[in-house]
Image (cartoon, grey):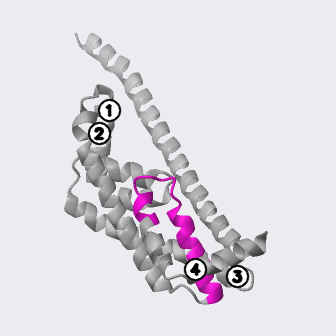
Amino acid sequence: MSQAILDFLHQAIASPWLYVAIFAIAVVDAFFPAVPSETAVITAGVFAASTGTPEVPLVIAVAAVGAFLGDHISYLLGRSSIGRLRRRGRAQAVFDWADRALRERGGLVLVIARYIPGGRTATTITAGAVSYSRRRFAFFDAIAAISWGCYAVAIGYVGGAAFENDPIRGLLLGFAIAIGVTIVVEVVRYVRRRRTRRAAAAARNADEMEEPAKLATGVSAE
C-alpha cells in the first residue's frame, strides 16, 4: 500500500504540472480552506530533499504567488459583501473591532493569521469588508505569502532530509512539525486572551471599588 502511494507521489512530483497544481491549490485555499495548500507545499519540500525534485526556489515562488493572488480574491470577496453584511446590526461590532485591529496592528494580524487554522481566510475577507487600505494589504500580504512559502517548504525539506530514503516518514515528520507549530501558536493565543481578560476584569473590579469611595467622599464634602 505504502509503495503504491510512494510510486504515485514520485510520478506526481516529477511532472512539470506540479508547479501549476501548487499554484492553483494555493489560490483556491485562500477562499476555500478545505483545499490543503500547505500539505501540497510540504510534500514538495520532502521530495525536494530526498530526490532533488522539484526545484525548491520554484516551489516557493509559485506557492507564494498563488497565495498572494488568492488572498486578493478573498479581499475582493470581502469588499463585495460589505453592504450586505453591514446591514446586519450585530455584525457591526465585529467590523468595528476588525477595523481597529487591522489599522493598529495590520501587518502583524495579516502575517500571523497565515499560521492560524482558518485565520487566513477570515482576516483577508474582513480586510476587504472593512475597506482596509489595498496598498498596505498588498505589502503585508506579500510578506505573509513569501514567509509562508519558505516555512512550508522548509518543514518538508527537514522531513525529507531526516528520512532521505523513506519519503513517507519524511512526510509524517513534516506534518508533525506543522501540527506542532500550529499547537504552539494556538496555546500562545489562548494564554494571551486569558491574560487580557483577567486584566480587563481586574480593571473593572478596581473601577467598581473606587466608585462607592468617590460617592462617599462627595457626600462627606457636602
Q: Local crowd at mark 3 within 10 Å, few (<14), some, or many (≥20)?
A: some
| Magenta highlight on residue 158 | no
* Alpha carbons under labels 2 and 1: distance apart: 6 Å
Q: Quadrant of residue 188?
A: bottom right
Instruction: Tell me how far mark 4 sits from mark 1, CA to CA.
Output: 45 Å
Comes first in the chain, label 3 or label 1: 1
Q: Residue 47: image x %, image y %?
A: 62, 81
Q: Residue at x 53, y 72 (%)?
A: 41
**Dot 4 or dot 2, earlier in sequence:** 4
Which secondary structure is most common in the magenta stretch? helix
CA separation, marks 2 and 3? 45 Å
Q: Mark 2 and mark 4 in contact (Cβ < 8 Å)?
A: no
Quarter of the picture holding the C terminus = top left
Residue 99, given in percent of the width and then of the height, sits at: 27, 45
Q: Which residue is mark 4?
A: 13
The label nearer to you, 4 versus 2, is 4
Label 3 and label 1: CA atoms lie apart by: 48 Å
Query: Which residue is label 1 attached to?
Result: 91
Q: Mark 2 belongs to which amino acid? A: Phe
Q: Position of residue 131 (x, y in %)?
A: 21, 49
The tag earlier along the polypeptide, 2 or 3, is: 2
Inspect the magenta stretch and tell me whether residue 40 lies in it: yes
Mark 2 in CB contact with mark 1 (< 8 angstroms)? yes
Q: What span is in magenta?
A: 25-51
Amino acid beneath label 4: Ile
Instruction: Specify few, some or many for label 1: CA neighbours under 10 Å numbering under 14, 14-19, or 20 or more.
Output: few
Tell me the residue that label 2 is attached to: 95
Residue 206: assigned label:
none
